[in-house]
Image (tube, helix red, strand yellow):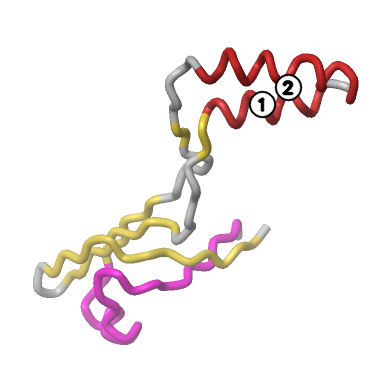
Amino acid sequence: MSATDEFKITQLVDSGQMIQLTLIENVSTEPISQKQMIIENVSKRLDAETKEQVMPLLEAILQAQPTINIKSYQQTQITIAMPRSRYENMGRPQVGNIIGINLKKL
């Protein structure tokens, strides 16, 4: 299995001959509310007639509950240390730049 993913540089540490990059997966996520997840899951499991009766009641119950936003994706974070020469051969990427990393089992 192989995947080339984009990672954003979040930290760069220059210690002379070695460069350390901290990367986080470049994925934009939208927070989803717990209420929305409950309504969608209940809606999927009910037939049209039952849904018509249950959904107004469920929405009224959930209206009284606090809205809790849930991150729908946990991002991968990688820290890489490399010699300065390799870093310079990459084009000297800076914090905020996006780089591609090919992840695969050999």
- Give the structural element (helix, strand or loop) at label 2: helix
> Please, is residue 41 above or below residue 23 in the view?
above
In the displayed image of the protein, which residue is found farthest to the left?
Answer: 16
Q: Are marks 1 and 2 in contact (CB under 8 Å)?
A: yes
The quadrant of the image that shows the C terminus is bottom right
In front: 76, or 62? 62
* Label placed on residue 39: 1
* Residue shown at the point (39%, 72%) measured from the top left: 98
Question: Magenta part of the protein: which range?
Answer: 82-105
Q: Kindly indicate the quadrant of the structure image that contains residue 69.
A: top left
Direction from residue 106 to residue 84 in the image, left or right: left
- Give the structural element (helix, strand or loop) at label 1: helix
Magenta stretch: residue 39 in it?
no
* Cα separation between marks 1 and 2: 5 Å
Q: Dot 2 corresponds to which residue?
A: 42
> Please, is residue 32 above or below residue 42 in the view?
below
> Please, is residue 16 above or below residue 89 in the view?
above
In front: 64, or 41? 64
Direction from residue 9 to residue 55 in the image, left or right: right
Question: Residue 8: percent from the left, percent from the top?
Answer: 37, 65
Direction from residue 72 to residue 19 in the image, left or right: left
Direction from residue 14 to residue 11 in the image, left or right: right
